[in-house]
Image (cartoon, grey):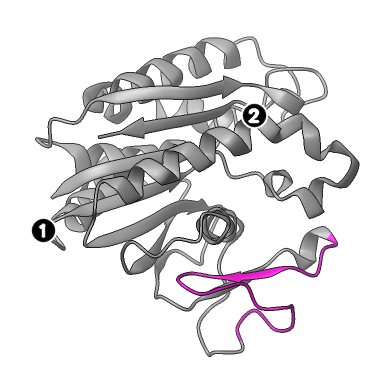
Amino acid sequence: MLVAAAVCPCPPLLVPEVATGAAQELDAARAACADAVGLLAAARPDRLYVVGAVPEGGHGVYPAGSAGSFAGFGVDVSVRLGERPTGGGAAAADGHRPLPASLTVGAWLLDRARWAAAPIEGLAVEETATPDVCAGLGRGLADSAGRVALLVMGDGSACRTVKAPGYLDERAEGFDAAAGRALGTADVAALLAMDTELAYELKAAGRAPWQVLAGAAEGAGLDGRLLFEAAPYGVGYFVAAWS
């Protein structure tokens, strides 16, 4: 049964070494993420799943010990699910597939929080997965242990300004406003009803992970709080806590 969830954005820029001179611009987001992860630990889960999206391929389960690296962003920093960071080197040295970017940022957040509250596993879902598929994955996670927590990694639209990755789209602000309301109130129905085509057009990589969360939360009666909402760099970032 799902007992708690934290929703966090997943830009590699959350990692100060990646952001370098712009690191302070996301200090508030990092602080909110730390608070949300702390609330997960307080829920005393039996198992924690880190859920994130992948553009194409690479979806599926990532077991504890799977590693990811920020080397592709010019920084020799590596992290592992459930372990302390390693100093660099091959991300897949232990034989597991390397973590996709969204799960790598999640692993970094957990390491930063010195997570030791429960075993960890990762789940990557394709950005184009249907709502039914996402909800089904979420239900499976919720049924896997008596007390389950989720760390859900995903961004909103990437079309809020002309300098955004997807350029300016006038629909982006309304999409993000609706997403923020749903995440902040633990509105499962609203998350499952999100327009998948619109989310794809707005490059909202969080849509699929959020719908995994919605499936896991069906019948759990959780309340939500929105801890952070902003659109730096023209991308919608949200931090929410469900418990």
Answer with left or right where residue 125 lies relative to residue 204.
left
Residue 71 seen anywhere in this rendered image of the structure = yes
Q: CA distance from mark 2 to mark 1?
A: 33 Å
Q: Quadrant of the C terminus?
A: top left
Q: Which stretch did the figure color magenta? A: 74-92
Residue at the location (49% across, 31% down)? Answer: 239
Q: Quadrant of residue 212?
A: top left
Residue identified by numbered label 2: 28
Tell me which amino acid carries mark 1.
Gly
Residue at the location (58% across, 61% down)? Answer: 104
Q: Residue 68, relative to residue 205: is it above or below?
A: below
Q: Earlier in the sequence, mark 2 or mark 1?
A: 2
Residue identified by numbered label 1: 146
Residue at the location (37% across, 33% down)? Answer: 241
Other-residue count near label 1 (Cα within 10 Å), few / some / many at <14 / 14–19 / ≥20: few
Nearer-the-camera pick, 241 or 198: 241
The stretch drawn in magenta includes residue 89: yes
